[in-house]
Image (spheres, grey):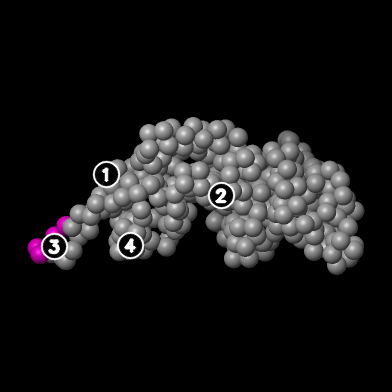
Amino acid sequence: MSSDITNPKEFNEDVRLDNALRPLSFNEYIGQNKIKDNLGILIEAAKKRSEPIEHVLLYGNSGLGKTTLAHIISKEMGVSIKATSGPAIEKTGDLASILTNLQSGDILFCDEIHRLNKTIEEILYPAMEDFNLDIIIGKGPSARTLQLELPHFTLIGATTHSGLISSPLRSRFGATYRLNFYEQLDIEKIISRSAKILKVNIENNNTLKLIAQCSRYTPRVANRLLKRVRDYSQVRANNVVNEQTTKEALEMLEIDEYGLEPADRYILKTIIEKFNGGPVGLRTLAASSHEEPETITDVYEPYLLQMGFLDRTLRGRIATKLAYDHLGIKYDPEGNKLF
């Protein structure tokens, strides 16, 4: 039921687009200004000391630019970057192979770092602190520990679930930054930049605003929408990208003016119509809306909470008055909410 258009997670077909549109410097990177400023200080100080930068943890919803920031950091430091992910490191040998192939100052970027298994995580502690890797060879009484000296590297971890990172691992990061949803103006600038790279001629600023307000304030979603609007305009409107063709493309995609797709609206309607507005537990909501619990928490909830359509309480999820108004359902604050 989930749409790939507004899902902020990266899919295989996104890789080429993300690489083509990815900013290569802080000057090209639009938005997240406080994080950019702090990282700039961190990098400049490390350069003056001729040292690698401290380990960095980036967290926030998918599609907000964590991977892009990691690549910019490596470019600003003038070092190589090796990318992996928590689930990809299954065995001690996998971690050892990655770390021993790094050069001094290199960056190891680990996406979904909250999904590292505990054994790997514990081996990572001395690697981050002392740049040593302890490997146990053999089993039982004959087992022995081999200590490998590692180059001084920087680990940049990225996660959408900072709360799932253990305290010992979190404490070993010298700098931690949270990426927030983008401002409307920043999204418009991102779309304008992407349009120039993709050679899409957008007629006026109102068209930019229309795409931006449906982007869920997420660059990856904004770029996907730009592509879909471009495709529609090429096929149905002789390459004219204006307010009218953009509205027609969004209507065909069933994306409304707030960036809500059918699945978003169905979840809100389920809470309202089946559970009288809530509260309703996550698993019950997932079963009733035919979505996986993880999809609700990772894809839909962050934006619905940000927009004020949903509240999350100790007893469960609640649809707000804004959700009722948006769906055209009358709201009774006394409790009899459906008419």
**Hey, what amino acid is under mark 4?**
Ser
Upstream in the sequence, badge 1 or badge 4? 4
Q: Dot 2 surroundings within 10 Å: few (below 14), some, or many (20 or more)?
A: some
Query: Closer to us: mark 2 or mark 3?
Result: 2
Q: Residue at x 36, y 44 (%)?
A: 169
- Residue 97 is labelled as 4
Q: Could you tell me which secondary element the residue under label 3 belongs to?
A: loop
Upstream in the sequence, badge 3 or badge 4? 4
**Hey, what amino acid is under mark 1?**
Asp
Magenta-tinted stretch: 141-145
| Residue under pointer 3 | 143
Upstream in the sequence, badge 2 or badge 3? 2
Q: Label 3 vs label 1: CA separation?
A: 23 Å
Q: Dot 3 surroundings within 10 Å: few (below 14), some, or many (20 or more)?
A: few
Q: Dot 1 surroundings within 10 Å: few (below 14), some, or many (20 or more)?
A: few
Instruction: Indicate whether residue 325 is drawn in magenta.
Output: no
Q: Residue at x 84, y 48 (%)?
A: 207
Asked where in the image residue 312 lies, by quadrant, the reply is top right
Q: Label 3 vs label 4: CA separation?
A: 21 Å
Q: Residue at x 60, y 62 (%)?
A: 15
- Residue 68 is labelled as 2
Q: Quadrant of the N terminus?
A: bottom right
Q: Label 2 vs label 4: CA separation?
A: 24 Å
Question: CB under 8 Å between callouts 1 and 4?
Answer: no
Front position in the image: 236 or 159: 236
- Residue 130 is labelled as 1
When the figure is inspected, residue 336 is found, relative to residue 143, above or below; the finding is above
Relative to 334, 282 lies left or right: left
